[in-house]
Image (cartoon, helix red, strand yellow):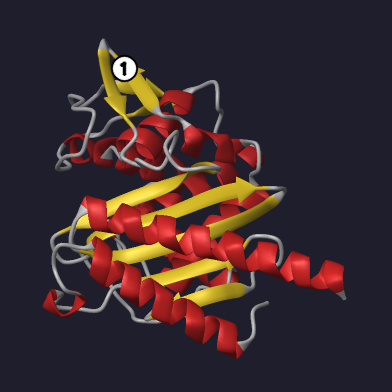
Amino acid sequence: MPNRRALHRWGVALALTGLVGGSVPALAAPRPVSEIVMDARDGSVLYAENAGIVRRPASLTKMMTLLLTFDAIDDGKLDPSGSILISRYAASQRPSRVGFKPGARMGVEDAIRAVAVLSANDVAVALAEAVGGTEDRFARMMTERARALGMTDTSFTNATGLPGANLSTAEDMAKLSLALLREHPKRYAVFSTRSFSWAGRRVQNHNHLLGAFEGADGIKTGYTAEAGFALAASAKRAGRRLIAVVIGERSIQARDRRVERLLDQGFAEIADARKGGAKG
């Protein structure tokens, strides 16, 4: 893990690149951006700034929705080859959504892809109802699972991240990303899906790092007016994987640039540490 001097140097570098690369000074933001980069090998934090600030996680919430869905499949409580019902309540969710009418059904595997790629709120609620009976009960399950993962500043009231009382931190979202990687490595591949087709409609993953940033292979984007733009991202280079989370950026472009800088700097620190170890 980098020493304090390295972390300070890193923080200064990130701040300077943010001022140079952004069109709006950081002081213009109404709330500080939360950011963290974590080593997936051992969960150690390489760099963090405002990562413990409690705020709205937006659609990063759906990572927990999918974690519980994967748990239910592993426990035999949800058949991956089966289908789920789209209730009237699920169908009433605001965009993003597939746009089902009440009473429709969707295959479980397609539902997982719709949530991971399209961030479909109607499908997220349908999965919540399939696993938990009701969204309220499922939200309590989400909070309990968060506690078990050490996400001490996280609580959920819905499965979507739509405006409500969901609360979390960038650090807790990094822990959740790591849990998905560790506990469901085969299922994790869905987060690297770059497009999703359903009923003649094709949508692209909102994670623009996929296919554009070296090593990027997931995981989830988010946005609400209150939360700002958020991204939990994972990338792997030279056998090492890092997870970066940013919450509260002012635009998609600023969010993506910040995550890319975090990951690039993280991999650079690892490379420097390897060189130092080789010399020693």
Q: Residue at x 36, y 38 (%)?
A: 115
Image: 16 above or below 86: below
Q: Residue at x 64, y 60 (%)?
A: 40
Q: Give whichever of 165, 202 is nearer the camera.
A: 202
User: Splitting the image into 4 quarters, where does residue 137 fall?
Assistant: bottom left
Q: Is residue 217 left or right of residue 113?
A: right
Q: Is residue 48 left or right of residue 19?
A: right
Q: Position of residue 194 (x, y in %)?
A: 41, 29
Q: Position of residue 196 (x, y in %)?
A: 36, 23
Q: Position of residue 129 (x, y in %)?
A: 37, 43
Q: Residue furthest right?
A: 280
**Tag count:** 1
Q: Is residue 23 left or right of residue 48?
A: left
Q: Quadrant of the C terminus?
A: bottom right
Q: Is residue 188 left or right of residue 165?
A: right
Q: Residue at x 29, y 68 (%)?
A: 18
Q: Residue furthest top?
A: 200
Q: Residue furthest bottom?
A: 4
User: What secondary structure is marked by label 1?
Assistant: strand
Residue 210 shows in the view: yes
Pointer 1: what residue? 198
Residue 56 shows in the view: no
Q: Residue at x 28, y 25 (%)?
A: 203
Q: Quadrant of the N terminus?
A: bottom right
Task: Tell me the crowding category of disc 1: few under 14, some 14 to 19, or many 20 or more residues within 10 angstroms, Cα based.
Answer: few
Image: 268 above or below 95: below
User: Splitting the image into 4 quarters, where does residue 79 fall?
Assistant: top right
Amino acid carrying label 1: it is: Trp
User: Splitting the image into 4 quarters, where does residue 215 fall?
Assistant: top right
